[in-house]
Image: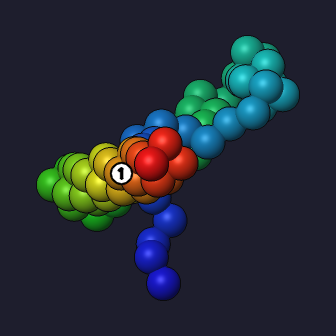
Amino acid sequence: MEPKLRTDFLIPETDFLTGMGSVASTQGSYFEYNYSENGILADERAIESDWRMVGKDILSAITKFRRELSLNA
């Protein structure tokens, strides 16, 4: 099974209400970030996921091109 592809490893996962609640936060750090053991590991995971997304986009474009090509033949 392919791992879930993400491009937001270093960005907090929030919604609108969480963002609004952070305005009134007096406790300091309000968001929970995606942590890794170190910066190198975080970069590796992010770069790998980015390239997997690129590959997925290329495969999708090839599939769409082949489908359009067969319809026009």
**Farthest residue in the top direction?**
23
Q: Is residue 66 left or right of residue 29?
A: left
Q: Quadrant of residue 29?
A: top right
- What residue sits 75% from the left and 33% below the top? 15
Q: Position of residue 66 (x, y in %)?
A: 41, 53
Q: Nearer the viewer, residue 34 or 26?
A: 34
- What residue sits 36% from the left and 51% below the top? 62
Here the colouring is rainbow
Q: Position of residue 28 (x, y in %)?
A: 59, 28
Q: Quadrant of residue 45?
A: bottom left
Q: Position of residue 26 (x, y in %)?
A: 70, 23
**16 lies above or below 34:** above
**Farthest residue in the front direction?**
73
Q: Nearer the viewer, residue 1 or 31?
A: 1
Q: Is residue 6 left or right of residue 30?
A: left
- What residue sits 48% from the left and 37% below the top? 11
Q: Is residue 62 left or right of residue 30?
A: left
Q: Position of residue 65 (x, y in %)?
A: 40, 45
Q: Which residue is mark 1?
A: 62
The kind of residue on which mark 1 rests is Ile
Q: Is residue 33 visible?
A: no
Q: Tag 1, which secondary structure?
A: helix
Q: Is residue 24 left or right of residue 8?
A: right
Count the marks: how many?
1
Density class for disc 1 (Cα within 10 Å; few <14, some 14-19, many ≥20) is: few
Q: Nearer the viewer, residue 58 or 50?
A: 58
Q: Nearer the viewer, residue 43 or 27?
A: 43
Q: Quadrant of residue 59?
A: bottom left
- What residue sits 79% from the left and 25% below the top? 16
